[in-house]
Image: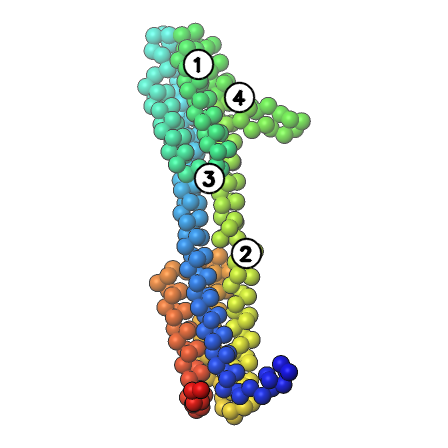
């Protein structure tokens, strides 16, 4: 019964259904774009904050090297127990503390990353106290403080154990933790190509079938050439969907007008054929 009924449908009725389907896929692509662009934008902003956190960690590492140089310079002074660690050392360690605090704002590794940052901050405070005390012992004390800064990590077989070395090594370990978190951040959720490809390419495949079916009916039943506007609408929608599926996100100022134009072209493409038939209302 169903097969007989479908065969007896007037082509104009089928065209109306096809128009609804094409407009629906354009609307669906627009909705998907708005959702993905919004959520991916949030993830992009978070990744940018993580980049800043990584920069702060690298800057802290540079300041640790300067603090080491300051200690080395202090060790050459004869009256080291009177001069202390010096202004250069104090300035470098103060900047280290400031950079680590700033890195907390862009932490992407969750509670794990936060605990590592707090560990390094504690390690810094302990090392500063050690250095302040060590200078009172003269050159030998300063060298001990420098060794604590440059200490190598413990080994598990041949694998270094993170956060078991000196302050410099801990900063390098912390940077690695944040880099790994950023990679996951950029490849997860709404920036994951494995999710976006079926999400956007599925509706495009359906739209392509609907456009081909429309062209077949227009050419076969109405003896007319399919409207070029329908092909342009398909290409315009595909230009947004394919780029989004490859995480090449477009701004709304570009994407929304293109999709709106695609919807308008799709509507107008069917209008000449539908206008040829006026069915009376029952």
- SS state under label 1: helix
Give the secondary structure at mark 3: loop
Q: Measure the alpha-carbon separation of dots 2 and 4.
A: 44 Å
Residue 151 is tagged as: 4
**Residue 109 pos. (x, y %):** 49, 37
Residue 133: name its quadrant. top left
Between 202 and 185, which is closer to the camera in this rendering? 202
Which residue is identified by label 3? Answer: 108
Point out the tag, 4 or 1, that comes first from the N-terminus.
1
Q: Quadrant of the C terminus?
A: bottom left
Number of residues whose C-alpha sits closer than 10 Å to that of mark 4, classed few (under 14), some (14–19) or many (20 or more): some
In the rendered view, how is the structure colored? rainbow
Instruction: For marks 4 and 1, give the CA distance.
Output: 14 Å
C-alpha distance separating marks 2 and 1: 52 Å
Q: Which label number is shown at residue 130? A: 1
Question: Measured along the vertical axis of the image, is residue 157 above or below residue 239?
Answer: above
Does the CB distance between marks 3 and 1 fall below 8 Å? no
Image spot of residue 48 (x, y percent): 41, 45
Please say if the residues under marks 4 and 3 sit with CB atoms less than 8 Å apart. Answer: no
Residue drawn at x 50%, y 84% is 13
Which residue is denoted by mark 2 in the rendering? 195
Name the residue located 63 percent from the left edge and 30 percent from the top edge.
Answer: 159
**Disc nearest the viewer among 2 and 1:** 2
Q: Is residue 59 visible?
A: no
């Amino acid at each position: 019964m169903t097969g007989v009924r479908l065969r007896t449908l007037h082509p104009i009725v089928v065209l109306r259904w096809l128009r609804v389907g094409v407009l629906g896929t354009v609307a669906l692509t627009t909705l998907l774009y708005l959702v993905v662009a919004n959520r991916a934008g949030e993830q992009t902003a978070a990744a940018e904050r993580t980049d800043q956190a990584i920069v702060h960690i690298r800057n802290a590492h540079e300041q640790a090297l300067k603090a080491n140089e300051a200690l080395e310079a202090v060790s050459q002074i004869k009256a080291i127990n009177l001069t202390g660690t010096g202004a250069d050392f104090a300035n470098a360690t103060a900047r280290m503390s400031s950079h680590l605090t700033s890195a907390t704002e862009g932490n992407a590794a969750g509670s794990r990353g936060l605990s590592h940052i707090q560990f390094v901050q504690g390690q810094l405070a302990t090392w500063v106290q050690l250095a302040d005390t060590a200078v009172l012992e003269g050159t030998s004390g300063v060298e001990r403080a420098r060794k604590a800064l440059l200490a190598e990590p413990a080994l598990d077989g041949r694998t270094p154990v993170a956060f078991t070395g000196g302050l410099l090594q801990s900063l390098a370990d912390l940077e690695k933790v944040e880099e790994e978190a950023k990679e996951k951040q950029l490849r997860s959720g709404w920036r994951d190509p494995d999710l976006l490809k079926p999400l956007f390419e599925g509706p495009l495949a359906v739209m392509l079938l609907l456009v081909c079916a429309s062209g077949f009916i227009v050419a076969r039943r109405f003896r007319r050439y399919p409207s070029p506007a329908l092909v342009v609408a398909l290409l315009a929608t595909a230009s947004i969907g394919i780029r989004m599926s490859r995480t090449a996100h477009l701004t709304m100022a570009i994407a929304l007008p293109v999709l709106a134009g695609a919807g308008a072209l799709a509507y107008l493409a069917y209008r000449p054929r539908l206008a040829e038939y006026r069915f009376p209302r029952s």
